[in-house]
Amino acid sequence: MDDGDRPVVVSTGIAMTGQNVAFLLVLVVAVSFFSYSIQRALRTLRVGLPEQRLDAPGRRTWNLLTIGFAQSKILRERGAGVSHAAVFWGFLVLTAGTAEILLQGVWPGFGYEHLLPRPLWQLFMLSQEVFAVIVLAAVSWLLWRRLVAPPKRLQGEEIHSTEAVIILGVIAALMVTLFTTGAFEYVAREGVRATHFGWFRPIATALGGAFGALSLGTAETLRDVSWWAHALLVLGFLNFLPYGKHFHVVNSLINVWFSNTSGPGTVGAMKPMDLEAEVESFGASDVEQLTWKNLLDGYACTECGRCTAACPANITGKVLSPRKIVTDTRDRLREKAPYVVGELDVEGSAEAMRLAPGAQAVLDNRLLDNWITEAELWACTSCRACVQECPVSIDQLEIINELRRALVLNESRFPEEVLPTFESLERNGSPWAFSPADRAQWAEGLDIPTMAEKLERGERPEILFWVGCMGSFDDRAKKITVAFARILQAANVDFAILGQEETCHGDPARRLGNEYLYQVLAKGTIETLDRYEVKTIVTFCPHCFHQMGNEFPQLGGNYEVIHHSTYIERLLEANLVPLQTEHGKRLTMAYHDSCYLGRYNDVYDAPRETLRRALPVVNLVEPARTKSRGLCCGAGGGRMFIDEKEGKRINIERTEELVATGAETIAVACPFCMTMMVDGVAKLEADVNVLDISEVVAAQLDPAHERAPLVAGD
Amino acid sequence: MKIAVCIKRVPDMGARFKIGADGASIDETGLKFDMSDFDEWAVEAALQLAEKHAGSTVTVISLGPDSVQETLRKALAMGADAAVQLKAESVPAGGFAVAQALAAELKDGGYDLILFGRLAVDSAAGITGPMVAELLGLPCATALCKLDVQGTSATGERQIEGGVEQLAFPLPAVCTIDQGLVVQARYPSLKGIMAAKKKPLASKPAALGGVGVTITKMELPAERAAGRIVGEGADAVPELVRLLQTEAKVL
Ligand code: SF4
Ligand code: SF4
């Protein structure tokens, strides 16, 4: 690596000065302490339960590249998102420069200019300054936002604001010292001025020019001061990391790799649970019953508040804050870990610590109740907005679900309104106390075969139309059932229903934490489906769709489950549905995304496409929060069965937003959303229709082609 | 304190019933069964008493075919300590036969308190408890909405028309429990369900007494005729009045 007339210093030991030796010592101490801290933190993760997270390394690495390095989730938010991504990318580039600076501290002759061809090296130097400027600008804006005008999501007691300000200050100081070191070097080391400065280091060169009046000696001293300040800040920052929230800088990337929230595995499926396992308790009431990955989530949380800002419960004034769920888990871990795994430095200290005064209080505490209250847990609609927004792929919902399981399965604690739900599920096979004999009443006179009838005739229908409990018993939802059946008949689809043999698959019980009841019901349903050798199921309820398609495999039920939005879209695309060509006047419609269809299953386009195909004159408008950022209707997570007493009603908040689009009709693709929207519209006294997408399509059916003379059951 | 609770397995009363082929029983196909509500409250009352008086045990007893074991398991899952099935092919309609079998089981059990629900929601007779008390020669307090035990005696309250009656009686005694004594029966937790699998459930033949009463015929109430919409608004009033006079004959 010879570069013309510049001396190449290869041997190191001889060139070392007193300063180098001093720095070497500092470096060794800093690195050792850092590794000690990391080990300590890792050790506390051993408090959690084991969980296999090494599967699908390719997929995980892809997540790391897109969500981690390309910052895809951070960038969902304009403004702060862009600033943060800039700081992050700047850091990646600058870390390369930092490595050089630290190495030069012990090995003065070291430099990338010896390793890289000159043009590349110049580019590298330029990138350092460019990113330093960007980082400085971004940090200034973030500081301004923290100190002068904090947005709502950065307020709240669980936030460590002072810490954030200090960290931002340190980053700013790092950038400034980077420039000043270069500038003083420019003045002090005339020998390299020509080769090491110029257009590729515009700021150091310009600053150096400005300091031109300094004597060589002063400049050299200032350069050393600047260099040491920079190096010490770097090492200090590194060592402070594991003790503050900026530990996320290290942990977030690791967490993204280990996370399952964007796959691998089935997105949104609740954790399987072995009810036969010989365990003391079920679910999680303290950190030991969460997995190490749940605990790592705590260390990865940046406290950015994106989750809480998107949480429908929090937005409408409930006590729940998904960020608090995560930070409470972390803080409880920090509180308890020393008593479980001990401190790293003392052998067997866990036992010793448990005898110390004050230990009992900590051991008597637990995550459930002492940190996270019942009210917070029951406020969750399981909408997944928090999981979707989290830039570091934390799974807040899994913690909530595990705690709910502990409440219900170990302690039978749940809102009193839920008891009749559980009892009806047990006795009547649906969440409401309707007689199972009435399940298929909607189908009377509609010439809809049951699986049993088909089997008797020796036929095996192509698809099973799974009606669901809402579709079977709820008066409004029954109209959706009939509309969808009419479409199937008009398209000559070979289908059947289970009729009275259909029972709830238990999803509401599962979401409400009652895994036992869920498994009883789900296994019963799987048995029925397998008895008829069902392969393909179509349903208009996103909860049934998600449960049977994504969670039944955990219990050995494997079926192709299709949501009616997708199914109708396919029928329309294949021109199988006879539609009228007369469309009437142009209609403005807003489609409301169901959480279990959208965020759980990534179905955003099919319902919209169905509306456009069936009704070409439609003018589809989008509410402010839409698609993956759509706001929940308030019915998910078993909230349908719990009274909403605190704060504003979620369905009102959502209906207001939909009505504000100016739409004449709100289209939904979920019977639960239907209930909530109908109620919202009534409460707001808005002159707006609420229709299921299948009702929009059914209204367009060509009467001349309808197979059977169907009179809807209304 | 040793507490026994006698419980009955009954069909879910919200179901649509059909008469069986013999015309004197209900057709059980498709029916869901569970513990009678009053019995559930009696179990809850027993569990609360046991929690208050350390060292107490709660034994649940049910008479019937093997399916009653499911109901007994539920009581065990709620927290009862032991269960006894008095095996019989079916539950005789005459309460006295049942009472004799229960009394035979309870006689030497050394129980301080024997609880029943005020009545079984299917047969609604409410006589088994008092008959057992009579057979055992024990005091009997019925339809209690409050029950407290002090050493070897107990006090209770029962709701009567327009007031409350306060009772005192020595133990052992038989009590039947009315709605309102407990706010709600506890929901068995999974932990409880798992623990129940390991609790003792004895099954022995029921020493049924002679059957005095048999059911000879059962009938469903007459179907209610479908509602009719006469019309809308003020115009419909004359027609409505006419129908109420001539058809319904209520005016
Ligand atoms: S799932 Fe939805 S309701 Fe529950 S904490 Fe997350 S954002 Fe809030
Ligand atoms: S959980 Fe995720 S979104 Fe929520 S505050 Fe922490 S890092 Fe931000």
Image: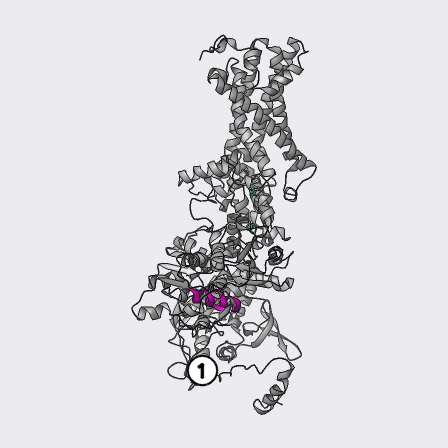
Give the quarter of the figure containing the N terminus of chain A: top left
Residue B108 appears in the rendering: no
**Which of the 4 image quadrants contains residue A336?**
top right
Image location (x, y in percent) of residue A636: 53, 57
A238 or A592, which lies in front?
A592
Image location (x, y in percent) of residue A463: 37, 62
Write down the region rendered in magenta.
A469-487
Residue for point 59% across, 46% down: A308
- Give the secondary structure at mark 1: loop
- Amino acid beneath label 1: Gly
Image location (x, y in percent) of residue A394: 52, 43
Judged from this view, the residue extending furthest toward the front is: A582
Please state if B1 lies on the left or on the right of A153 as rendered: left
Image location (x, y in percent) of residue A501: 40, 68
A310 or A244, which lies in front?
A310
Does B220 appear above or below A261?
Answer: below
Task: Please say whether residue A486 is one of the residues in the magenta stretch.
Answer: yes
Please state if B11 lies on the left or on the right of A418 as rendered: left
Q: Chain of mark 1?
A: B
Does A406 appear above or below B203?
Answer: above
A119 or A373, which lies in front?
A119
Looking at the image, what colour scheme do you see? one colour
**Which of the 4 image quadrants contains residue A560?**
bottom left
Q: How many marks?
A: 1
Does A647 appear above or below A254?
Answer: below
Task: Please say whether residue A442 is one of the residues in the magenta stretch.
Answer: no
Residue picked out by circle 1: B94
In the image, is the residue at mark 1 within 8 Å of ligand 1 by its beta carbon? no
Residue A569 appears in the rendering: yes
Judged from this view, the residue extending furthest toward the left is: A458
Circle 1 packing at 10 Å, graded few (<14), some (14-19), many (20+), is some
Q: Main secondary structure of the magenta part?
A: helix
